Image (cartoon, rainbow, N blue to C red):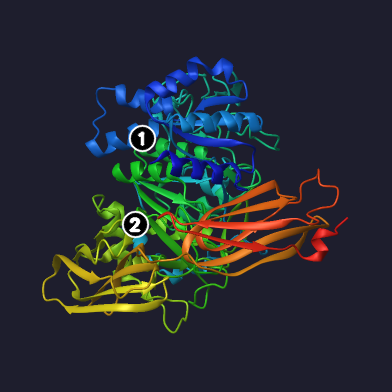
């Protein structure tokens, strides 16, 4: 990455509104030597503080153990992960020091320490009977329990923690036997020197299994925020207790046990690992999420559930997910609750299965995200599950459709533990129930656990090339080679479609196929395509009328392409009783937005939108040091694409903003 591009990213990062917890950044040094020099000279950088990411030592310890065999791909990802650090700045002088390090070539990459949130839910009244779990009948899972309950499969839940004393989860936790000091197969979260009801605890302050984590009997609490907060937020610890309730609700959907009371989870035979990365309010820094993912991967967790998300595309998060993927971890994520076709992560990463939500009528729910990037749907409304304090409640949202799919996958893996994530995704799509007459459907189906478990053989539908988010200059590359792989015992034909911005079909290749398996390639002429965002969708049509699919997003531009701005304006809103102007604009190509506010030829404030998008909405908080907010100020907007295209415009503030207060 060139210094000019990196400095541009640095500007975007410094003025990004997403660092909710202060000026904290994820930094990747150019080399171990550059990092070492920073540490040696840290005394003179008093406005900066460098912290190792929580998993750095764990990675080193893991690599040093003789019995841990890694592939070359895993070694490469671990090297990348080991090079990330957290740098905190106290003031603008500290940001200037970071800029100096970038200009000297010592920093390769920087991004905000993004904050992700759990997918919030609506709630209903409480009851406690199996008959309230309509969704178990909807996915045909009850008969499956005669054959499989997910026994032997370990599921990690990265969330707000789990209620450790809920009756329906009492026997459902994975136990790290070497850390179970009293050896009773349960977790007693008190000191091994203290006796409670005749039983000493499991906490001895030692890393008995040598995995880099002290007393991690059932998982770990990774939350270590360095800002004022409430609840358990200061330091990592081995007691992943849920203060919010969200993680407990998710755990109930997956793993509530068969105990003649309460409810039953989709896969009641699994063991769950409690991985607390989210605080009492439901927020998590990306570094803590990444730490939880890496912990799970290194401890051979088979399935990970992500009932959270954001628009933030974090390199750190994606690298952690890529490492877990390379270790054979199956990751399932909620598609989001915006009710739109929208970028959403981690569900948007190709290594993750994205799950939308349907209602009891079998339709896509009003708040569920949808579109080509959602892999499958599952019930997500009026979901009856666990709550804190040994209670129960109804909840809504994709947060609860994702664990239904995670539980279904656990049932499948007990039968065949060698299925890959692409095979699992394709089997779920091949065996699901079609979404009939739903305008939001793009050919997806609703998960059918009964059919998925009974499916004989395997299926796969994967686009191998191009890679995700690739940008292509069609004057330099007239044709795009698409390489893909399909196999299924029911394989009949395939469609290869090119969509403009996920929805408008611009090219369609339909081929009949007599073989059950193909590895093929197709060349697409890019010269007739307009500049913009496109989606390749590969769909395998099956003999049972179902479809399995894969998708990849890419961008097209040319030497003559211009970045065009439309609908640029200032919209005035109210926040906490005060005016909050918002800069709004759209572009024909994805871009970054920077807004500069100038008064008397002097720049008084700069704001930058971190999102790479064709639609921007950027709040412009009024500085407290302006006696008359934004009066006589001019607004200059600048948009920049990754390919270097730029566009500019000038706006004016509405009168009500300029004369406020």
Residue at 62% of width from left, 56% of height from top? 392
Location of residue 574 in the rendering, given as x and y in whole percent from the top left corner: 78, 61
Quadrant of residue 448 within the rendered picture = bottom left
- In the rendered image of this protein, does residue 642 appear above or below residue 614? above
Q: Secondary structure at mark 1?
A: helix
Q: Which residue in the protein does label 2 denote?
A: 468
Q: Which residue in the protein does label 1 denote?
A: 80
- Residue at the outermost front position: 601
Q: Tell me, yes or no, whether the two marked residues, 2 and 1, touch with CB atoms within 8 Å.
A: no
- In the rendered image of this protein, does residue 43 appear above or below residue 429? above
Q: Residues within 10 Å of mark 1 (few under 14, many from 20)?
A: some
Residue at 65% of width from left, 61% of height from top? 583
Location of residue 598 in the rendering, given as x and y in whole percent from the top left corner: 70, 51
Quadrant of residue 481 within the rendered picture = bottom left
**Whether residue 249 can be seen here:** yes
Of the numbered discs in the image, which one, if any, rests on residue 396?
Answer: none
| Left or right: 605, with 338 as reference point | right
Quadrant of residue 350 within the rendered picture = bottom left
- In the rendered image of this protein, does residue 260 appear above or below residue 365? above
Residue at 22% of width from left, 36% of height from top? 72
First along the sequence among labels 2 and 1: 1
- Residue at the outermost left position: 515
- Residue at the outermost right position: 661
Q: Secondary structure at mark 2?
A: loop
Location of residue 331 in the rendering, given as x and y in whole percent from the top left corner: 39, 51
Location of residue 103 in the rendering, given as x and y in whole percent from the top left corner: 47, 32
Residue at 26% of width from left, 53% of height from top? 420
Quadrant (top left, top right, bottom left, bottom right) of the C terminus? bottom right
Q: How many marks?
A: 2
């Amino acid at each position: 990455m060139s210094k000019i591009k990196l400095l541009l990213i640095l500007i975007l990062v410094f003025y990004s509104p997403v660092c909710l917890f202060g000026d904290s950044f994820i930094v990747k040094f150019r080399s171990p030597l550059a990092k070492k020099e920073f540490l040696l000279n840290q005394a003179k950088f008093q406005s900066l503080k460098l912290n190792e990411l929580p998993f750095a030592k764990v990675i080193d310890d893991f690599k040093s153990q003789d019995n841990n065999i890694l592939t070359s791909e895993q070694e490469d990802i671990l090297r990348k992960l080991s090079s990330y650090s957290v740098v905190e700045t106290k003031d603008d002088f500290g940001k200037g020091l970071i800029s100096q390090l970038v200009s000297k070539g010592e920093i390769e990459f920087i991004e905000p320490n993004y904050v992700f949130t759990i997918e919030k839910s609506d709630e209903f009244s409480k009851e406690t009977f199996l008959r309230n779990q309509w969704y178990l009948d909807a996915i045909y899972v009850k008969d499956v329990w005669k054959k499989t309950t997910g026994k032997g499969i370990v599921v990690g839940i990265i969330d707000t923690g789990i209620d450790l004393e809920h009756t329906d989860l009492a026997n459902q936790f994975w136990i790290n036997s070497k850390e179970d000091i009293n050896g009773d197969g349960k977790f007693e979260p008190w000191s091994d020197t203290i006796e409670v009801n005749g039983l000493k605890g499991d906490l001895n302050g030692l890393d008995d299994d040598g995995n880099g984590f002290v007393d991690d009997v059932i998982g770990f609490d990774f939350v270590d925020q360095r800002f004022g907060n409430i609840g358990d937020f200061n330091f990592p610890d081995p007691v992943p207790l849920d203060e919010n309730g969200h993680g407990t609700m998710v755990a109930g959907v997956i793993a509530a046990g068969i105990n003649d009371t309460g409810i039953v989870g989709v896969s009641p035979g699994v063991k769950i690992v409690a991985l607390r990365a989210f605080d009492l309010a439901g927020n998590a820094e990306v570094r803590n999420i990444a730490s939880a993912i890496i912990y799970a991967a290194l401890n051979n967790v088979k399935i990970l559930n992500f009932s959270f998300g954001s628009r933030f595309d974090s390199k750190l998060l994606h690298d952690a997910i890529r490492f877990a993927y390379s270790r054979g971890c199956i990751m399932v994520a909620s598609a989001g609750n915006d009710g739109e076709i929208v970028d959403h992560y981690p569900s948007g990463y190709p290594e993750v299965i994205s799950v939308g939500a349907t209602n009891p009528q079998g339709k896509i729910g009003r708040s569920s995200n949808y579109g080509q990037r959602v892999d499958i749907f599952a019930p997500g409304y009026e979901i009856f599950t666990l709550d804190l304090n040994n209670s129960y409640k109804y909840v809504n949202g994709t947060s609860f459709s994702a664990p239904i799919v995670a539980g279904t996958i656990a049932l499948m893996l007990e039968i065949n533990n060698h299925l890959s994530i692409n095979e699992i995704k394709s089997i779920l799509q091949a065996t699901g129930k079609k979404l009939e007459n739903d305008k939001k459907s793009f050919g997806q189906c609703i998960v059918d656990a009964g059919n998925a478990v009974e499916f004989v053989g395997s299926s796969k539908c994967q686009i191998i090339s191009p890679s995700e988010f690739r940008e292509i200059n069609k004057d330099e590359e007239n044709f795009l080679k698409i390489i893909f792989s399909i196999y299924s015992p029911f394989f009949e034909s395939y469609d290869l479609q090119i969509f403009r911005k996920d929805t408008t079909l611009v090219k369609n290749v339909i081929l009949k196929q007599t073989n059950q398996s193909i590895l093929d390639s197709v060349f697409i002429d890019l010269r007739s395509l307009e500049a913009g965002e496109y989606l390749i969708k590969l769909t395998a049509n099956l003999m049972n009328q179902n479809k399995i699919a894969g998708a990849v997003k890419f961008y097209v531009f040319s030497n003559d392409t211009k970045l065009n701005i439309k609908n640029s304006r200032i919209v005035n809103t109210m926040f906490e009783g005060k005016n909050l102007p918002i800069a709004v604009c759209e572009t024909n190509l994805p871009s970054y937005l920077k807004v500069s506010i100038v008064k008397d030829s002097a720049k008084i404030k700069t704001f930058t939108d971190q999102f790479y998008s064709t639609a921007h909405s950027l709040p412009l908080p009024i500085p407290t040091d302006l006696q008359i907010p934004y009066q006589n100020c001019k607004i200059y907007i600048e948009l920049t694409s990754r390919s270097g295209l730029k566009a500019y415009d000038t706006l004016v503030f509405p009168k009500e903003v300029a004369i406020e207060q």
